[in-house]
Image (tube, rainbow, N blue to C red):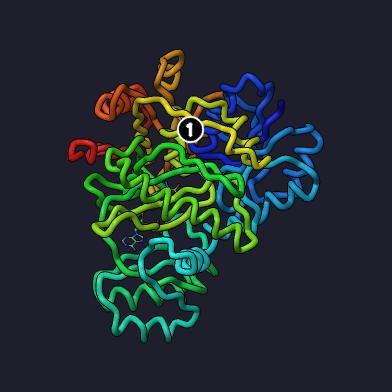
Protein backbone atom coordinates (compact mmCIF):
# COMPACT_ATOMS: atom_id res chain seq x y z
CA UNK A 1 0.00 0.00 0.00
CA UNK A 2 0.90 3.66 -0.38
CA UNK A 3 1.03 5.85 2.73
CA UNK A 4 1.18 9.64 3.04
CA UNK A 5 2.41 11.20 6.28
CA UNK A 6 1.64 14.86 6.99
CA UNK A 7 4.21 16.80 9.02
CA UNK A 8 7.91 17.59 9.10
CA UNK A 9 9.37 16.96 12.55
CA UNK A 10 11.07 14.26 14.58
CA UNK A 11 7.69 12.76 15.41
CA UNK A 12 6.84 12.35 11.73
CA UNK A 13 10.28 10.82 11.10
CA UNK A 14 9.58 8.27 13.87
CA UNK A 15 6.12 7.55 12.40
CA UNK A 16 7.61 7.19 8.90
CA UNK A 17 10.33 4.86 10.23
CA UNK A 18 7.70 2.70 11.96
CA UNK A 19 5.43 2.66 8.89
CA UNK A 20 8.44 1.62 6.78
CA UNK A 21 8.80 -1.54 8.95
CA UNK A 22 5.44 -2.81 7.72
CA UNK A 23 5.65 -5.45 4.97
CA UNK A 24 2.32 -4.11 3.67
CA UNK A 25 3.84 -0.77 2.70
CA UNK A 26 5.40 -0.35 -0.72
CA UNK A 27 5.79 3.45 -0.84
CA UNK A 28 5.77 6.32 1.66
CA UNK A 29 5.27 9.98 0.88
CA UNK A 30 5.69 12.77 3.40
CA UNK A 31 4.41 16.34 3.13
CA UNK A 32 6.47 18.39 3.59
CA UNK A 33 8.98 16.11 5.42
CA UNK A 34 12.65 16.84 6.10
CA UNK A 35 16.09 15.55 5.06
CA UNK A 36 15.99 12.47 7.30
CA UNK A 37 12.45 11.52 6.32
CA UNK A 38 13.63 11.90 2.71
CA UNK A 39 15.84 8.83 3.16
CA UNK A 40 12.84 6.53 3.68
CA UNK A 41 10.02 8.48 2.03
CA UNK A 42 9.49 10.74 -0.95
CA UNK A 43 9.06 14.26 0.40
CA UNK A 44 6.56 16.48 -1.39
CA UNK A 45 6.65 20.26 -0.99
CA UNK A 46 3.08 20.74 0.24
CA UNK A 47 2.47 22.43 3.59
CA UNK A 48 0.50 20.66 6.31
CA UNK A 49 -2.24 23.32 6.19
CA UNK A 50 -2.72 23.13 2.40
CA UNK A 51 -5.67 20.74 2.64
CA UNK A 52 -6.85 21.08 -0.98
CA UNK A 53 -3.40 20.35 -2.36
CA UNK A 54 -2.91 17.43 0.01
CA UNK A 55 -6.27 15.90 -0.92
CA UNK A 56 -5.51 16.36 -4.64
CA UNK A 57 -2.10 14.74 -4.16
CA UNK A 58 -3.58 11.78 -2.28
CA UNK A 59 -6.12 11.22 -5.07
CA UNK A 60 -3.58 11.57 -7.85
CA UNK A 61 -1.12 9.11 -6.25
CA UNK A 62 -3.92 6.78 -5.10
CA UNK A 63 -2.76 6.93 -1.49
CA UNK A 64 -4.31 4.12 0.58
CA UNK A 65 -3.78 5.70 3.98
CA UNK A 66 -2.85 9.19 5.18
CA UNK A 67 -1.48 9.71 8.70
CA UNK A 68 -1.62 13.17 10.25
CA UNK A 69 1.23 13.86 12.67
CA UNK A 70 0.65 17.48 13.67
CA UNK A 71 -1.95 19.25 15.79
CA UNK A 72 -2.63 22.33 13.60
CA UNK A 73 -4.09 20.48 10.60
CA UNK A 74 -6.11 18.17 12.85
CA UNK A 75 -7.66 21.06 14.75
CA UNK A 76 -8.24 22.79 11.40
CA UNK A 77 -10.24 19.84 10.02
CA UNK A 78 -7.84 18.03 7.69
CA UNK A 79 -9.43 14.66 8.47
CA UNK A 80 -12.86 15.97 7.46
CA UNK A 81 -11.36 17.27 4.20
CA UNK A 82 -9.89 13.84 3.36
CA UNK A 83 -13.01 11.93 4.41
CA UNK A 84 -15.22 14.20 2.30
CA UNK A 85 -13.34 12.86 -0.73
CA UNK A 86 -13.61 9.25 0.39
CA UNK A 87 -9.93 9.01 1.39
CA UNK A 88 -8.76 6.88 4.32
CA UNK A 89 -7.05 8.95 6.97
CA UNK A 90 -5.79 8.34 10.51
CA UNK A 91 -6.58 11.06 13.05
CA UNK A 92 -9.55 12.72 14.77
CA UNK A 93 -12.10 14.82 12.91
CA UNK A 94 -12.28 18.51 13.67
CA UNK A 95 -15.11 18.07 16.16
CA UNK A 96 -12.95 15.61 18.16
CA UNK A 97 -9.55 17.31 17.73
CA UNK A 98 -11.06 20.14 19.79
CA UNK A 99 -9.98 18.00 22.74
CA UNK A 100 -6.54 19.53 22.09
CA UNK A 101 -7.65 22.63 20.19
CA UNK A 102 -9.57 24.19 23.07
CA UNK A 103 -8.42 23.92 26.66
CA UNK A 104 -11.72 25.45 27.81
CA UNK A 105 -13.57 22.66 25.98
CA UNK A 106 -11.39 19.94 27.49
CA UNK A 107 -11.72 21.35 31.01
CA UNK A 108 -15.51 21.56 30.70
CA UNK A 109 -15.60 18.00 29.38
CA UNK A 110 -13.57 16.73 32.33
CA UNK A 111 -15.76 18.59 34.80
CA UNK A 112 -18.98 17.31 33.24
CA UNK A 113 -17.79 13.69 33.20
CA UNK A 114 -15.92 13.75 36.53
CA UNK A 115 -12.49 13.10 35.04
CA UNK A 116 -9.83 14.13 37.58
CA UNK A 117 -8.13 17.41 36.70
CA UNK A 118 -7.14 20.70 38.36
CA UNK A 119 -9.97 22.99 39.56
CA UNK A 120 -10.43 25.88 37.11
CA UNK A 121 -12.57 28.66 35.66
CA UNK A 122 -12.79 29.79 32.01
CA UNK A 123 -12.78 33.50 31.12
CA UNK A 124 -13.38 35.40 27.91
CA UNK A 125 -13.44 38.79 29.61
CA UNK A 126 -10.14 40.17 30.99
CA UNK A 127 -11.91 42.27 33.67
CA UNK A 128 -13.56 39.18 35.09
CA UNK A 129 -10.30 37.24 34.96
CA UNK A 130 -8.52 40.01 36.87
CA UNK A 131 -11.29 40.22 39.47
CA UNK A 132 -11.16 36.44 39.97
CA UNK A 133 -7.40 36.57 40.58
CA UNK A 134 -7.82 38.99 43.52
CA UNK A 135 -9.20 36.22 45.69
CA UNK A 136 -7.35 33.26 44.15
CA UNK A 137 -4.61 31.26 45.82
CA UNK A 138 -1.05 31.60 44.41
CA UNK A 139 0.75 30.07 42.57
CA UNK A 140 -1.84 29.84 39.85
CA UNK A 141 -1.79 28.68 36.23
CA UNK A 142 -3.05 30.63 33.20
CA UNK A 143 -3.62 28.86 29.90
CA UNK A 144 -4.47 30.26 26.50
CA UNK A 145 -7.49 28.32 25.23
CA UNK A 146 -6.16 27.64 21.74
CA UNK A 147 -3.02 26.15 20.20
CA UNK A 148 0.11 28.10 21.13
CA UNK A 149 2.98 25.71 20.28
CA UNK A 150 2.90 24.42 23.86
CA UNK A 151 3.87 27.88 25.10
CA UNK A 152 0.53 29.37 26.11
CA UNK A 153 0.79 28.18 29.71
CA UNK A 154 1.95 30.61 32.41
CA UNK A 155 2.74 29.51 35.96
CA UNK A 156 2.35 32.60 38.13
CA UNK A 157 3.81 32.78 41.63
CA UNK A 158 2.38 36.15 42.65
CA UNK A 159 -0.79 38.13 42.07
CA UNK A 160 1.21 40.67 40.06
CA UNK A 161 2.63 37.98 37.77
CA UNK A 162 -0.85 36.59 37.25
CA UNK A 163 -2.27 40.01 36.38
CA UNK A 164 0.60 40.58 33.94
CA UNK A 165 -0.17 37.16 32.48
CA UNK A 166 -3.81 38.01 31.85
CA UNK A 167 -2.66 41.15 30.07
CA UNK A 168 -0.13 39.21 28.00
CA UNK A 169 -2.61 36.55 26.92
CA UNK A 170 -5.89 38.46 26.62
CA UNK A 171 -4.97 42.07 25.86
CA UNK A 172 -1.54 42.03 24.22
CA UNK A 173 -2.49 38.74 22.55
CA UNK A 174 0.99 37.19 22.60
CA UNK A 175 -0.59 34.02 21.25
CA UNK A 176 -3.10 35.71 18.97
CA UNK A 177 -6.67 34.51 19.07
CA UNK A 178 -5.55 31.50 21.15
CA UNK A 179 -5.83 33.91 24.10
CA UNK A 180 -9.37 35.17 23.46
CA UNK A 181 -10.45 32.74 26.13
CA UNK A 182 -8.21 31.64 28.97
CA UNK A 183 -8.39 28.93 31.60
CA UNK A 184 -7.27 29.87 35.10
CA UNK A 185 -6.50 26.76 37.08
CA UNK A 186 -5.21 25.47 40.35
CA UNK A 187 -1.44 24.88 40.52
CA UNK A 188 -0.61 21.22 41.13
CA UNK A 189 2.65 19.52 42.01
CA UNK A 190 3.91 16.06 41.17
CA UNK A 191 5.72 14.09 38.51
CA UNK A 192 4.53 14.39 34.93
CA UNK A 193 3.90 11.41 32.71
CA UNK A 194 2.91 11.27 29.04
CA UNK A 195 0.65 8.39 28.08
CA UNK A 196 -0.12 7.89 24.40
CA UNK A 197 -3.09 5.77 23.33
CA UNK A 198 -4.83 4.49 20.22
CA UNK A 199 -8.58 5.09 20.06
CA UNK A 200 -11.19 3.85 17.56
CA UNK A 201 -14.19 5.83 18.80
CA UNK A 202 -15.15 3.22 21.40
CA UNK A 203 -12.09 1.25 22.45
CA UNK A 204 -8.91 2.74 23.87
CA UNK A 205 -5.61 0.96 24.21
CA UNK A 206 -2.69 2.68 25.80
CA UNK A 207 0.81 2.38 24.42
CA UNK A 208 3.59 2.65 26.97
CA UNK A 209 4.38 5.58 29.26
CA UNK A 210 7.02 8.24 28.67
CA UNK A 211 8.35 11.42 30.21
CA UNK A 212 9.30 14.61 28.41
CA UNK A 213 11.68 17.40 29.49
CA UNK A 214 10.08 20.66 28.42
CA UNK A 215 12.54 23.26 29.67
CA UNK A 216 15.54 24.32 27.61
CA UNK A 217 18.21 23.93 30.28
CA UNK A 218 19.53 21.36 32.73
CA UNK A 219 17.71 21.13 36.05
CA UNK A 220 14.43 22.17 34.37
CA UNK A 221 15.64 25.74 34.03
CA UNK A 222 15.18 28.09 31.12
CA UNK A 223 12.28 28.58 28.77
CA UNK A 224 9.65 26.06 27.74
CA UNK A 225 10.43 24.27 24.49
CA UNK A 226 8.68 21.71 22.31
CA UNK A 227 10.57 19.06 24.33
CA UNK A 228 14.32 18.47 24.85
CA UNK A 229 14.27 14.74 25.44
CA UNK A 230 12.23 11.79 26.61
CA UNK A 231 12.47 8.40 28.21
CA UNK A 232 10.13 5.43 28.10
CA UNK A 233 8.74 3.76 30.11
CA UNK A 234 8.29 6.01 33.14
CA UNK A 235 9.29 4.09 36.28
CA UNK A 236 6.76 6.21 38.19
CA UNK A 237 3.85 4.96 36.13
CA UNK A 238 3.07 1.93 38.29
CA UNK A 239 0.47 -0.77 37.77
CA UNK A 240 -1.62 0.87 40.47
CA UNK A 241 -1.55 4.24 38.73
CA UNK A 242 -2.35 2.55 35.44
CA UNK A 243 -5.37 0.84 36.99
CA UNK A 244 -6.62 4.17 38.35
CA UNK A 245 -6.20 5.90 34.99
CA UNK A 246 -7.88 3.08 33.09
CA UNK A 247 -10.90 3.36 35.38
CA UNK A 248 -11.20 7.12 35.89
CA UNK A 249 -9.42 8.79 32.96
CA UNK A 250 -8.87 6.81 29.74
CA UNK A 251 -12.15 5.05 28.99
CA UNK A 252 -14.18 7.87 30.61
CA UNK A 253 -12.58 10.35 28.19
CA UNK A 254 -13.42 8.21 25.16
CA UNK A 255 -16.96 7.64 26.44
CA UNK A 256 -17.40 11.36 27.13
CA UNK A 257 -16.38 12.30 23.60
CA UNK A 258 -18.78 9.73 22.21
CA UNK A 259 -21.60 10.96 24.43
CA UNK A 260 -20.97 14.51 23.20
CA UNK A 261 -21.41 13.37 19.58
CA UNK A 262 -17.68 13.78 18.95
CA UNK A 263 -16.34 10.22 18.64
CA UNK A 264 -12.55 10.30 18.79
CA UNK A 265 -10.46 8.19 16.41
CA UNK A 266 -6.71 8.51 16.43
CA UNK A 267 -4.15 9.08 19.15
CA UNK A 268 -5.06 10.65 22.47
CA UNK A 269 -2.01 11.82 24.38
CA UNK A 270 -2.76 12.19 28.08
CA UNK A 271 -0.51 14.67 29.84
CA UNK A 272 -0.82 13.50 33.44
CA UNK A 273 0.45 14.79 36.75
CA UNK A 274 0.89 12.25 39.52
CA UNK A 275 -0.21 14.32 42.51
CA UNK A 276 -0.42 13.30 46.16
CA UNK A 277 -4.15 12.94 45.64
CA UNK A 278 -3.72 10.69 42.63
CA UNK A 279 -3.28 11.17 38.88
CA UNK A 280 -4.80 14.31 37.31
CA UNK A 281 -5.09 15.29 33.64
CA UNK A 282 -2.93 18.33 32.82
CA UNK A 283 -3.88 18.37 29.17
CA UNK A 284 -5.00 16.29 26.24
CA UNK A 285 -3.32 16.23 22.85
CA UNK A 286 -4.95 14.75 19.77
CA UNK A 287 -1.77 13.26 18.23
CA UNK A 288 1.51 11.56 19.05
CA UNK A 289 3.88 13.55 21.26
CA UNK A 290 7.12 14.97 19.95
CA UNK A 291 9.61 13.70 21.20
CA UNK A 292 7.47 11.02 22.91
CA UNK A 293 6.90 9.20 19.60
CA UNK A 294 10.68 8.88 19.24
CA UNK A 295 10.92 6.65 22.34
CA UNK A 296 7.52 4.93 22.18
CA UNK A 297 7.42 3.77 18.55
CA UNK A 298 10.85 2.07 18.51
CA UNK A 299 9.61 -0.12 21.40
CA UNK A 300 6.33 -1.08 19.72
CA UNK A 301 6.17 -4.64 18.34
CA UNK A 302 2.94 -4.39 16.31
CA UNK A 303 2.72 -3.56 12.65
CA UNK A 304 1.52 0.03 13.04
CA UNK A 305 -0.49 -0.18 9.80
CA UNK A 306 -2.72 -2.83 11.41
CA UNK A 307 -3.29 -0.52 14.37
CA UNK A 308 -4.03 2.55 12.21
CA UNK A 309 -6.53 0.53 10.18
CA UNK A 310 -8.20 -0.88 13.30
CA UNK A 311 -8.67 2.65 14.65
CA UNK A 312 -10.27 3.78 11.39
CA UNK A 313 -12.47 0.66 11.11
CA UNK A 314 -13.52 0.56 14.76
CA UNK A 315 -11.89 -2.83 15.40
CA UNK A 316 -9.23 -1.87 17.90
CA UNK A 317 -10.69 -4.41 20.35
CA UNK A 318 -9.29 -7.14 18.07
CA UNK A 319 -5.72 -5.82 18.38
CA UNK A 320 -3.30 -6.81 21.11
CA UNK A 321 -0.81 -3.96 21.54
CA UNK A 322 2.63 -5.24 22.37
CA UNK A 323 5.74 -3.40 23.55
CA UNK A 324 9.29 -4.62 24.10
CA UNK A 325 10.31 -5.15 27.72
CA UNK A 326 13.17 -2.69 27.39
CA UNK A 327 13.62 1.07 27.57
CA UNK A 328 14.44 3.95 25.25
CA UNK A 329 15.87 7.43 25.72
CA UNK A 330 15.81 10.32 23.24
CA UNK A 331 18.15 13.30 23.61
CA UNK A 332 17.32 16.26 21.39
CA UNK A 333 20.24 17.97 19.68
CA UNK A 334 19.19 21.59 19.25
CA UNK A 335 20.65 24.78 17.84
CA UNK A 336 22.21 26.81 20.66
CA UNK A 337 19.82 29.63 21.55
CA UNK A 338 16.62 27.62 20.95
CA UNK A 339 13.77 28.37 21.71
CA UNK A 340 14.68 32.04 21.11
CA UNK A 341 17.29 33.11 18.56
CA UNK A 342 19.55 30.66 16.83
CA UNK A 343 21.51 30.25 13.61
CA UNK A 344 20.81 27.53 11.08
CA UNK A 345 22.31 26.18 7.87
CA UNK A 346 25.30 24.40 9.49
CA UNK A 347 26.42 21.08 7.94
CA UNK A 348 25.75 18.02 10.13
CA UNK A 349 28.52 15.39 10.38
CA UNK A 350 28.29 11.83 11.65
CA UNK A 351 24.78 10.80 10.60
CA UNK A 352 26.11 7.71 8.83
CA UNK A 353 27.44 6.32 12.12
CA UNK A 354 23.86 5.29 12.93
CA UNK A 355 23.50 3.15 9.81
CA UNK A 356 23.26 -0.55 10.60
CA UNK A 357 23.48 -0.01 14.38
CA UNK A 358 20.68 -1.94 16.01
CA UNK A 359 18.75 -0.05 18.66
CA UNK A 360 20.13 3.39 17.72
CA UNK A 361 18.11 5.95 15.77
CA UNK A 362 18.64 9.51 14.63
CA UNK A 363 15.26 11.11 13.97
CA UNK A 364 15.47 14.39 12.08
CA UNK A 365 13.46 17.38 13.31
CA UNK A 366 14.89 20.53 11.73
CA UNK A 367 17.15 19.50 8.84
CA UNK A 368 17.23 20.04 5.11
CA UNK A 369 19.32 19.18 2.09
CA UNK A 370 21.44 22.02 0.73
CA UNK A 371 23.83 21.35 -2.15
CA UNK A 372 23.71 17.63 -1.42
CA UNK A 373 24.63 18.06 2.25
CA UNK A 374 22.33 17.75 5.28
CA UNK A 375 22.30 21.02 7.23
CA UNK A 376 20.56 22.32 10.36
CA UNK A 377 17.23 23.97 9.64
CA UNK A 378 15.47 24.54 12.96
CA UNK A 379 15.66 24.91 16.72
CA UNK A 380 15.30 21.23 17.41
CA UNK A 381 17.59 19.56 14.87
CA UNK A 382 17.81 15.84 15.69
CA UNK A 383 16.39 13.38 18.22
CA UNK A 384 19.12 10.88 19.07
CA UNK A 385 17.39 7.78 20.41
CA UNK A 386 18.78 4.56 21.81
CA UNK A 387 17.26 1.50 23.36
CA UNK A 388 18.74 -0.46 26.24
CA UNK A 389 17.79 -3.37 28.45
CA UNK A 390 16.76 -0.84 31.11
CA UNK A 391 16.48 2.94 31.42
CA UNK A 392 20.02 3.46 32.68
CA UNK A 393 21.49 1.46 29.83
CA UNK A 394 19.28 3.26 27.29
CA UNK A 395 20.36 6.63 28.70
CA UNK A 396 24.07 5.70 28.54
CA UNK A 397 23.62 4.49 24.96
CA UNK A 398 21.71 7.61 23.88
CA UNK A 399 24.27 10.00 25.37
CA UNK A 400 27.14 8.04 23.80
CA UNK A 401 25.40 8.36 20.44
CA UNK A 402 24.99 12.12 20.80
CA UNK A 403 28.80 12.28 20.49
CA UNK A 404 28.67 10.72 17.03
CA UNK A 405 27.04 13.86 15.66
CA UNK A 406 28.77 17.19 15.14
CA UNK A 407 27.47 20.55 13.95
CA UNK A 408 28.50 24.11 14.62
CA UNK A 409 26.10 25.26 17.37
CA UNK A 410 25.05 21.86 18.74
CA UNK A 411 23.25 22.14 22.09
CA UNK A 412 21.69 19.48 24.32
CA UNK A 413 20.53 18.98 27.86
CA UNK A 414 22.84 16.74 29.86
CA UNK A 415 20.25 15.51 32.35
CA UNK A 416 17.61 13.80 30.23
CA UNK A 417 16.40 10.87 32.33
CA UNK A 418 17.94 12.11 35.58
CA UNK A 419 14.66 11.20 37.29
CA UNK A 420 15.47 7.55 36.54
CA UNK A 421 18.01 7.67 39.40
CA UNK A 422 15.29 8.64 41.85
CA UNK A 423 13.00 5.75 40.92
P1 LIG B 1 0.03 21.94 29.25
O1 LIG B 1 0.34 22.48 27.87
O2 LIG B 1 -1.35 22.19 29.70
O3 LIG B 1 0.48 20.51 29.44
O4 LIG B 1 1.00 22.73 30.21
C1 LIG B 1 2.40 22.80 29.96
C2 LIG B 1 3.15 22.53 31.23
O5 LIG B 1 2.75 23.46 32.25
C3 LIG B 1 2.86 21.16 31.83
O6 LIG B 1 3.65 20.17 31.23
C4 LIG B 1 3.17 21.40 33.28
O7 LIG B 1 4.55 21.34 33.51
C5 LIG B 1 2.73 22.82 33.50
N1 LIG B 1 1.35 22.87 34.04
C6 LIG B 1 0.21 22.91 33.33
N2 LIG B 1 -0.86 22.93 34.14
C7 LIG B 1 -0.39 22.91 35.40
C8 LIG B 1 -1.02 22.92 36.68
N3 LIG B 1 -2.33 23.00 36.83
N4 LIG B 1 -0.20 22.88 37.76
C9 LIG B 1 1.14 22.84 37.62
N5 LIG B 1 1.77 22.83 36.45
C10 LIG B 1 1.03 22.87 35.33
N1 LIG C 1 6.17 16.61 23.94
C1 LIG C 1 4.96 17.30 24.16
C2 LIG C 1 4.09 17.43 23.00
O1 LIG C 1 4.27 16.81 21.99
O2 LIG C 1 3.15 18.19 23.10
Quadrant for the N terminus in the image: top right
Residue in the picture at 42% in, 75% down: 121
Taking the view exactly as shown, the residue that stands out farthest to the left is: 422
Q: Secondary structure at mark 1?
A: strand
Quadrant for the C terminus in the image: top left
In this view, the residue in front, 178 or 266, is 266
Q: Position of residue 400 (x, y in %)?
A: 29, 23
Task: Sort mark 1 into few (<14), some (14-19) or many (20+) by Cα contacts within 10 Å.
Answer: many
Picture mark count:
1
> Can residue 174 be seen in the rendering of this structure?
no
Left or right: 304 in relation to 128: right
Residue in the picture at 75% in, 45% down: 53
**Residue named by callout 1:** 364
- Residue 369 to residue 127: above or below: above
Left or right: 91 in relation to 226: right
In this view, the residue in front, 15 or 266, is 266
- Quarter of the image for residue 141 reads bottom left
- Residue 396 to residue 174: above or below: above
Determine whether the beta carbon of the residue marked 1 sits less than 8 angstroms from the nearest atom of ligand 2.
no
- Residue 3 to residue 8: above or below: above
Q: Position of residue 113 (x, y in %)?
A: 48, 65
Q: Position of residue 273 (x, y in %)?
A: 33, 54
Residue in the picture at 41% in, 16% down: 358
- Residue 359 to residue 82: above or below: above
Residue in the picture at 65% in, 53% down: 93
- Quarter of the image for residue 166 reads bottom left
> Can residue 248 be seen in the rendering of this structure?
yes
Left or right: 404 in relation to 221: right
Amino acid sequence: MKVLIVGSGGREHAIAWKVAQSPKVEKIYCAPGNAGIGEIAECVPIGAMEFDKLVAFAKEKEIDLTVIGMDDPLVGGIVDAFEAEGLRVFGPRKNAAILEGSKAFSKDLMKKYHIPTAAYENFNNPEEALAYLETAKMPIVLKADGLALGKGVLICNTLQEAKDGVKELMLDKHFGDAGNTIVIEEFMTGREVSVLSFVDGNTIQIMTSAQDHKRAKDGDQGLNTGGMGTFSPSPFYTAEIDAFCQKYIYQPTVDAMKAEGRPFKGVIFFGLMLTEDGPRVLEYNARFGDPEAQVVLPRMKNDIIDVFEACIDGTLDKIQLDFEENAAVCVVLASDGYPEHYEKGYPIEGLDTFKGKNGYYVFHAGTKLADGKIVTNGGRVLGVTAKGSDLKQARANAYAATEWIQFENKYKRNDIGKAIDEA
